[in-house]
Amino acid sequence: MNMKKFSKKLVTVVLAAATMVSMTACGSSPQDGTGTSGGSDDNSVLKVGYNSEPASFDPADFTTVASLYAGYDCYDTLLNFTQDGTDVEPALADSWEEVDPLTYTYHIREGVKFSDGNELTMEDVLYTLQRVTEDGYYMSYLFAAVDSFEVDEATRTLTVHLAYEDSTWKYIPATSPFCIMEKSVAEAAGDSYGSSPETTVGTGPYKLVSWTSGSEIVMEKNEYWWGDPDTLDIDTVEFYIIEDESSLAMAAKSGQVDFVQGFSNDVKSVYDSISDMTVMTGNGTTAYYMLFNTTSEPFNDENARKAVVSCLNVSEITSVVGGAFASECPVAVLPEATQYMDEAAWDETISGSATYSQDYDKVKEYLAASAYPDGFEFDYYYSAKYQKLAELIKSQVDASGMITMNIVEVPSSDFFSYMYGYTTQDDGSVCYDAGGIYWMSDYLDPIGFFSPLYSSSCIGEGGTNMAGWSNPEADELLKSASVATTDEEKMNYYTQAYSIFAEQVPYVGLYSLKDSYAISNRYSYTPSPMLWYNFTYADVSINK
């Protein structure tokens, strides 16, 4: 019985720096490196390898994949996503009701305890949610529709009052801002909350027992877990931080780790060569794309944007950069997993809307129709991790002979500050003409991509509409979709909006990336498309 499922949002903050260490230094003995995953003699101890570590175990910092794999299991949310990611199911809330389009109620389970043995109260629930809005931390954008929260201790009921209708609210109690914390512990710890086992207290299936920064994190079964700790196959999770992905792959090959999630095509052959390890992939919600700053020259000109897009060979980009784990993304950014509502309708819409391919004659046509008939030069911002992507796009654009693309590397630690408009030019405008970035949706509903990327409400400092693009008709379509109650109604608005996005092309989708896993054959795990909020070590089982 799967008592907890999670998954999480694509990084819009910088991954915490991690120090590469050898597994031997962490206390594991090297194996003979013959290509057989050895792992622990005790199968109830799962050794996990990852190339970064969380900033903390505070849910406010659950904005990186490292946080997901190291810390998310210490907490529970009110609801969970279903395995296929398209709906929600009970977790801390054993029942809930949409009283009306502006009012939702949630009944919290009786007898739930935190990992320190204290009872979960409605005051803890209220504190957690108010902390999100009052502290204004990153994931608070998910609470944009909220007017107020109220709780009733006697009935163990949380009531959420929305300021406006939003049919996607039903998904939000399954996301990380609903990781319920113990108020007294959080208040006592203050800014140090989540930095140690003593300051990390939740209701999840596991609890933090040690953390050696840059080296090793250990979690053990939470004996107070409401979902019954005896149902968990994995007693202990040992999380090893190995920054270099080639070194991590070799650690898996030598049997020093049992489980790895998230690796590139560059090291896939190493994992494929491990006889006692299985490589799995699953559709996810991560898409990579190129964005244009539509608020200034040259990309306030639609034809200038189309000229650049017509330089791109997206198939080559997908193959060379994305590799075996990637598939081409439509022009308007929408991964395959989010097209579940009506795949045939999406196929028809995508093929029937504006499409672009590498065609340098078309480049000349678009330039002739633009304010730049003789071509132009622009700056493309990227982080070092995506140098290969930047260089390939540059080669394709420069080959036009009329457009020159300068690539500007921004340190990983600063990249999101630039892209989200915190670091600007002296006049307050963004620094980039264009850029390369990715997005991971909070849910499979297409609005998880369409609203943050294309809605005018998401423009500004800290906003997710980094193109600064706005279109009143598109805004109205997205607003209508957000209150639609059936998939059929939503699809009507989404397909119309898609056509506008593709025609005006403030973004161009490049490729979507499948989630990748390598797991010892001693264990089993079934991936969910909602990796970001659905992953849990509670779902890893030992093969008997």
Image (spheres, rainbow, N blue to C red):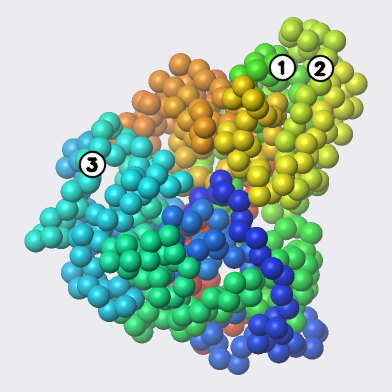
Q: Residue at x 76, y 48 (%)?
A: 384
Residue type pointed to by label 2: Phe
Task: Specify which label sits upstream in the sequence, 3 or 1.
Answer: 3
Query: Counting other residues with Cα less than 10 Å from the Cα at mark 3, is it few (<14), some (14-19), or many (20 or more)?
Result: some
Among the 4 quarters of the image, the one containing residue 401: top right
Q: Quick check: 441 left or right of 169?
A: right
Residue type pointed to by label 3: Ser
Q: Secondary structure at mark 3?
A: strand
The location of residue 399, given as percent across then percent down, is 89, 27
Query: Counting other residues with Cα less than 10 Å from the Cα at mark 2, is it few (<14), some (14-19), or many (20 or more)?
Result: some
Viewer can see residue 421: yes
- Residue placed most toward the observer, 343 or 236: 236
The location of residue 351, given as percent across then percent down, is 62, 27
The location of residue 535, given as percent across then percent down, is 49, 63
The location of residue 438, given as percent across then percent down, is 62, 43
- Residue placed most toward the observer, 480 or 165: 165
Among the 4 quarters of the image, the one containing residue 273: bottom right
Against 116, is 319 above or below? above
Name the residue carrying label 1.
298
Q: Secondary structure at mark 2?
A: strand
Query: Counting other residues with Cα less than 10 Å from the Cα at mark 1, is it few (<14), some (14-19), or many (20 or more)?
Result: many
Name the residue carrying label 3.
148
Name the residue carrying label 2.
376
Against 70, is 142 above or below? above
**Marks 1 and 2 in Cβ contact (< 8 Å):** yes
Residue type pointed to by label 1: Pro
**Marks 3 and 2 in Cβ contact (< 8 Å):** no
Q: Residue at x 64, y 68 (%)?
A: 50
